[in-house]
Image: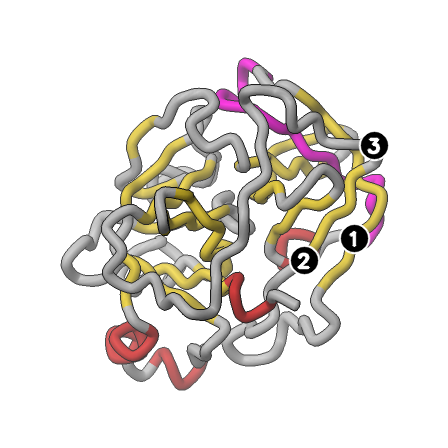
């Protein structure tokens, strides 16, 4: 998923899900997502752009390897709830968030499946040394295929001000706001979220507990290179 990522391990990120989409009668990995509680999963709104029909999606929980289908639970989607202000054409895509309500209940007693608490507004998380991204997105810039195994990377979260500086002129086309959180930069040119990571988590440890800080929204450029990856800042969307 991650350009420059390393192979993770089953159960290491139990909040991580694979959102699968129906493509010509076959469900395939489309996006990452995160478990908030036994009924709800958080993804990026652009993950459900191609269809608003819940029957076209399902989630696999507790999975590590796509080809092995080693998931612990598979659930259909009952309801898609996009952010009310979401619009693909607004510069910067500032409301790229979507909640998915599952049919049935997520089994949080499974050792490979758990919910993750959301990040807090009092923290910027910039400079936190224990922040990670994970997913099955492209791990090869020359391939369109997702990574078969879940990948992870310990990432540098940077301030929005520094991120805007790195985006330069491109930041005028795709502005960054308080609802964004960036990771990567010239110090780590080989670490990027990439296609298929969308919707997936950025987590940071605070007071000994990992919190869901970001939802993968923009990869920075078509080759998943050059500019920092942009995530939606979860804390700005908390009620």
- Residue under pointer 2: 98
For the N terminus, the image quarter is: top left
Identify the secondary structure beneath mark 3. loop
Residue 81: image location, x then y, percent = 77, 58
Which residue is label 3 attached to?
104
In the image, 203 versus 148, the foreground residue is 203
Can residue 59 be found in the magenta stretch? yes
- Packing grade of label 1 (10 A; few <14, some 14-19, many >=20) is some
Label 3 – label 1 distance at C-alpha:
15 Å
Q: Earlier in the sequence, mark 3 or mark 1?
A: 1
Q: Residue furthest front?
A: 207
Q: How many marks?
A: 3
Left or right of 77, for residue 177? left
Q: Position of residue 152 (x, y in %)?
A: 35, 36
Magenta part of the chain = 52-69
The picture places residue 133, in percent across and down from the top left corner, at 39, 45
Left or right: 166, with 224 as reference point:
left
The residue that label 1 is drawn on is 80
Distance of mark 2 from mark 3, alpha carbons? 19 Å
Query: Residue at (70%, 54%) from the top-left corner?
Result: 99
Mark pair 1, 2: CA separation: 7 Å
Residues at badges 1 and 2 in contact (C-beta under 8 Å)? yes
Q: Nearer the viewer, residue 3 or 112?
A: 112
**Dot 2: what SS?**
strand
Dot placed on the residue nearer the N-terminal end, 2 or 3:
2
The crowd level at tag 2 (other Cα within 10 Å; few <14, some 14-19, many 20+) is many
* SS type, badge 1: strand
Question: Looking at the picture, how far across and down is residue 212, in whole percent?
Answer: 49, 51
Can see residue 201? yes
Residue found at x 54% / y 70%: 236
- Where is 205 relative to 58, above or below? below
> Between disc 1 and disc 2, whose residue precedes?
1
């Amino acid at each position: 998923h991650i350009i420059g990522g390393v192979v993770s391990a089953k159960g290491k990120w139990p909040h991580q899900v694979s959102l699968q989409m129906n493509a010509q009668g076959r469900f395939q990995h489309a996006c990452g997502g995160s478990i908030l509680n036994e009924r709800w999963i958080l993804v990026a709104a652009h993950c459900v752009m191609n269809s608003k029909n819940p029957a076209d999606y399902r989630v696999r929980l507790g999975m590590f390897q796509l080809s092995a289908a080693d998931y612990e639970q598979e659930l259909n989607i009952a309801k898609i709830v996009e952010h009310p202000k979401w619009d693909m054409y607004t510069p910067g895509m500032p409301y790229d968030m979507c909640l998915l309500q599952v049919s049935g209940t997520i089994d949080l007693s499974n050792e490979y499946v758990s919910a993750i608490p959301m990040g807090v507004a009092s923290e910027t998380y910039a400079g936190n040394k224990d922040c990670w991204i994970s997913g099955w997105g492209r791990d090869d810039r020359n391939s369109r295929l997702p990574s078969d195994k879940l990948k992870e990377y310990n990432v540098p979260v940077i301030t929005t001000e520094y991120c805007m500086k790195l985006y330069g002129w491109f930041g005028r086309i795709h502005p960054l706001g308080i609802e964004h959180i960036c990771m990567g930069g010239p110090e780590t040119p080989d670490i990027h979220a990439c296609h298929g990571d969308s919707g997936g988590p950025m987590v940071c440890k605070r007071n000994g507990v990992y919190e869901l800080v970001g939802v993968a929204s923009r990869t920075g450029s078509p080759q998943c290179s050059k500019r920092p990856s942009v995530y939606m800042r979860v804390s700005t969307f908390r009620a």
